[in-house]
Amino acid sequence: MSFHDWWTNENNPSIPQQEYLYGTRHIIMLAVALVLVVVLSIVFARKSQKAKNILLTILISILLFFEISSRVVNLAICTDFSWQNILKILLPMHICSVAVVTLIIGYFSKNKILMNFSTVVGFLATIAFLLYPAVGINKMYISFTCLYSITSHIVGFVVSCLLINLGFVKLKFNDIWQTFLCFAIMFAYGVLLDFVILPGSDYMYLVNDPLSLDITFPYQIIYGALIALYILVFYVVLNIKNKKHSV
């Protein structure tokens, strides 16, 4: 693979899902994510707040680097400069991307609402990717695009866990409405993408049923209910955990 192929992801054939799902690459990716969470949580549990801040700043700066560099690369190899295509490159188009962008903005601006939201949505999005990846390890070679996807999801998962384990995020029940509101705004943004900016697209999984549910009514009702239940359970589990540690 030439350098040009590496950073443009050209001449990089796809691998059938059955060949990579829970194969060597997938297991290594899962192991790296889990080991990083466990080791960093243990090592930094008794470190000073300054040390914890440095760790989170480094990890989130890695996410920022890949968010910027991936867009620079995509603009550099772009041949279609229509405004729709430029928006696809510049805007966060998927749930994972929204989680990363809100995490970066929330952390560096010290916005607790965005920090809470990005932790909850980031954990969901990265867990989904780590358990059932559709990109990143689905190519013959690990190109820049693949590296961006793998690194962003692993680091995003690690950061989501560390924000909780190291006490950056508390997720109090009094503030749960803020997280629900942020999710609603994210899905409203998805509706704008799917029906106004890029008609016919399916960002945020708002058009086609990603769960393949055999139901006679709009699947979006079940989708929304599952997301709401997930948020509630996330808050309940974390509050039980915090109470046990405070006793």
Image (cartoon, rainbow, N blue to C red):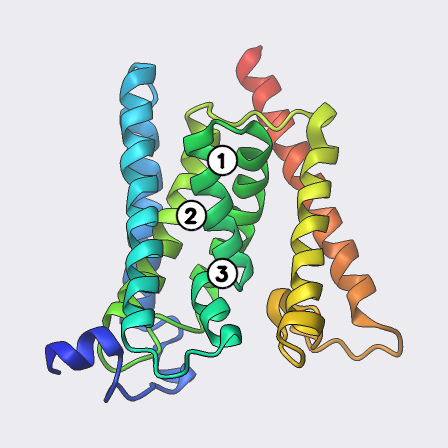
Of residue 46 and residue 144, the one placed in the foreground of this image is 144
Residue 86: x and y, percent? 45, 71
Of residue 150 and residue 91, the one placed in the foreground of this image is 91
How far apart are the two marked residues, 3 and 1, measured between alpha carbons?
A: 17 Å
Q: Residue farthest to the left?
A: 2
Q: In which image quadrant can residue 15 be found?
A: bottom left
> Considering only vertical position in the picture, is 201 above or below 52?
below
Q: Residue farthest to the right?
A: 216
Considering only order in the chain, which callout, 1 or 3, is on the residue closer to the N terminus? 3
Mark 2 and 3 residues: CB-CB less than 8 Å, in contact?
no
Considering only order in the chain, which callout, 3 or 2, is on the residue closer to the N terminus? 3
Q: Residue at x 25, y 85 (%)?
A: 10
Per the image, the residue denoted by label 2 is 157
Q: In which image quadrant can residue 137 be found?
A: bottom left
Dot 3 amino acid type: Leu
Res 142 seen here: no
Disc 2 vs disc 1: which is toward the camera?
1
Mark 3 and 1 residues: CB-CB less than 8 Å, in contact?
no
Q: Residue at x 34, y 16 (%)?
A: 49
Disc 3 vs disc 1: which is toward the camera?
3
Residue 8: x and y, percent? 25, 78
Dot 1 amino acid type: Gly
The tag on residue 91 is 3
Callout count: 3
Of residue 219 and residue 87, the one placed in the foreground of this image is 87
> Considering only vertical position in the picture, is 123 above or below 192?
above
Question: Is disc 3 surrounded by few (<14), some (14 to 19) or many (20+) residues within 10 Å?
Answer: few
How far apart are the two marked residues, 2 and 3, measured between alpha carbons?
A: 21 Å
Quadrant assignment for the C terminus: top right
Res 247 seen here: yes
Per the image, the residue denoted by label 1 is 106
